[in-house]
Amino acid sequence: MQTGESRPLPALPAFETVDDILREAARTIVLPHFRNLAGADVRTKTGPNDFVTVADERCEAFLRKALTEALPGSVAIGEEAAAADPAVLDRLGRPGDVWIIDPIDGTWNYAHDNHRFATIVALVRDGITVCGYIHLPSRDETYAAGLGQGARGAFGALRLLEPAAFGAMTGALYVGKSRAPAMFKQIRALRDRGRLGPRRFARCAAWEYIAMLTGRAHYAVFTRLLPWDHAAGILMIAEAGGCYGYVDDAPQSGPWRPVERDVPFLLAPDAASWRTIRDTLKGE
């Protein structure tokens, strides 16, 4: 930020502070509603599989208040607030501290009594993601990363799997026919020829990031990069030594500026495997 005078930046909240907030939200809002939703507690937004529940709305309101109190001067935007007014996303490109909140990532699972859901929180400072948290309520586990501070989980530092031959790597492939038709066609061809390795599909971005960070998956491809779904996870992958990038560009590491483009986005253990996976999935 270019100004006439420097602006002192407040210290980031301690991991324990945000962890306590996430655990309280899970204990008092998310878990009590899980497998206990009435018909009126669930509705759809943009389509028949785009769910929102009363727990999403209550959890987002709780987190917005608690997180901005934990970091004075910050503001917060959440998935449900952005759904009501997409213009709030403009705040991510402005100076200052902005919390990004996904109260329940994997709401389809949550509404269908499937335990694969999460609460995701990331902090963007002056346009760059500087910390991120993923809490898994069904497991009572929190994973976190800070810019330049590494990634940590319930059992210590997080590391990615070593790269392998493409056909031996497990991938989460969120590639739909309508959003990425060429890559969708190539993936089907690789599958039909027996060249595609094991695949994951948890219906929850957070669970795919945790799978990469805990040795259960090598790579992931997403074709819609909504910031509340991905800001925390991308930072965690970078801090664990991995790299990321849109497939029409070069692999990147380090801080990420939340921005969505209509291009598939790939995360991998290192730059060499990123290029191998990218080229294979693009048929190059």
Image (tube, rainbow, N blue to C red):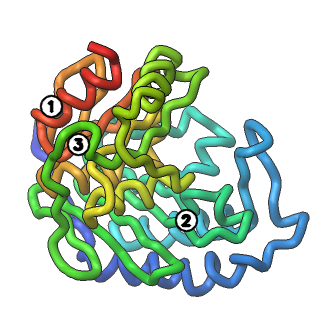
- Residue 284 position (above or below residue 91): above
Residue at (60% x, 21% y) in the render:
178
- The residue that mark 2 highlights is 117
- Residue 171 position (above or below residue 134): above
Specify the amino acid type for callout 3.
Answer: Ala
Q: Is residue 196 left or right of residue 44?
A: left
Q: Is residue 14 left or right of residue 50?
A: left
Tag 1, which secondary structure? loop
Tag 3, which secondary structure? strand
Give the Cα distance between marks 1 and 2: 40 Å
Q: Position of residue 74 (x, y in %)?
A: 37, 57
Specify the amino acid type for callout 1.
Answer: Gln
**3 vs 1, front mark:** 3
**Front-most of residues 73 and 32:** 32
- The residue that mark 3 highlights is 268
Specify the amino acid type for callout 2.
Answer: Phe
Residue at (43% x, 71% y) in the render:
135
Marks 1/2 in contact by CB < 8 Å: the verdict is no
**2 vs 3, front mark:** 3
Q: Position of residue 250 (x, y in %)?
A: 17, 23
- Residue 112 position (above or below residue 48): below
Residue at (41% x, 46% y) in the render:
172
